[in-house]
Image (spheres, rainbow, N blue to C red):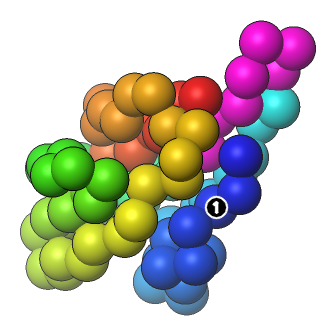
Amino acid sequence: MKVPKSLQNVDDGGAVVRTLEYEDGSVIAVDFGTSAADIDVDVVGSMAIIVTDDEQFEFELPPEASDVSVHNGVLTIEE
C-alpha cells in the first residue's frame, strides 16, 4: 500500500511516517508524537480528515485501506 501524497509531507512537521509490510497485508503508521496526543480522524467516503492540536488536513485513502484508527498519537491505515 502506498503512502498518500499528503501524508508524505507530514514528516516535515515532525511526524514519522512508516509503511510496514506483512504476509497478509500492510500498515501505514504515522506517529505525530506526544505533542499531538489528541488526534481525531473522520472518514467520509474515501477521504480521511485528520485534526491535531494545531493542524487539520485531509487525504484520499488508498483503495486497499480497510481500517483507519488513531491510538496514542499514532494514525494507522490497515490493508
The residue to which callout 1 is attached is 3
Q: State whether residue 9 is above or below residue 58.
A: below
Task: Report x, y in % for residue 53.
Answer: 12, 68
Count of labels in the image: 1
Q: Nearer the viewer, residue 64 or 5?
A: 64
Confirm whether residue 67 shows in the render. Answer: yes
Q: Which of 36 and 63 is in front in this view?
A: 63
Q: Which of 77 and 32 is in front in this view?
A: 77
Identify the residue at horizontal 54%, vertical 52% (top origin): 62
Q: State whether residue 69 is above or below residue 2.
A: above
Q: Give the range drawn in magenta.
A: 22-28
Q: What is the secondary structure assignment of the residue under circle 1? A: loop
Q: In this view, does 41 lie to the left or right of 8?
A: left
Q: Which corner quadrant of the image does residue 2 belong to?
A: bottom right
The quarter of the rendered structure image containing the C terminus is: top right
Task: Report x, y in % for residue 15.
Answer: 50, 67
Q: Which residue lies furthest to the top in this view?
A: 24
Amino acid residing under circle 1: Val
Query: Is residue 67 one of those drawn in magenta?
Result: no
Task: Report x, y in % for residue 57.
Answer: 25, 77
Q: Which corner quadrant of the image does residue 48 belong to?
A: bottom left
Q: State whether residue 52 is above or below residue 20.
A: below
Majority secondary structure of magenta residues: strand
Q: In this view, does 76 lie to the left or right of 43?
A: right
Q: Residues within 10 Å of mark 1 (few under 14, many from 20)?
A: some
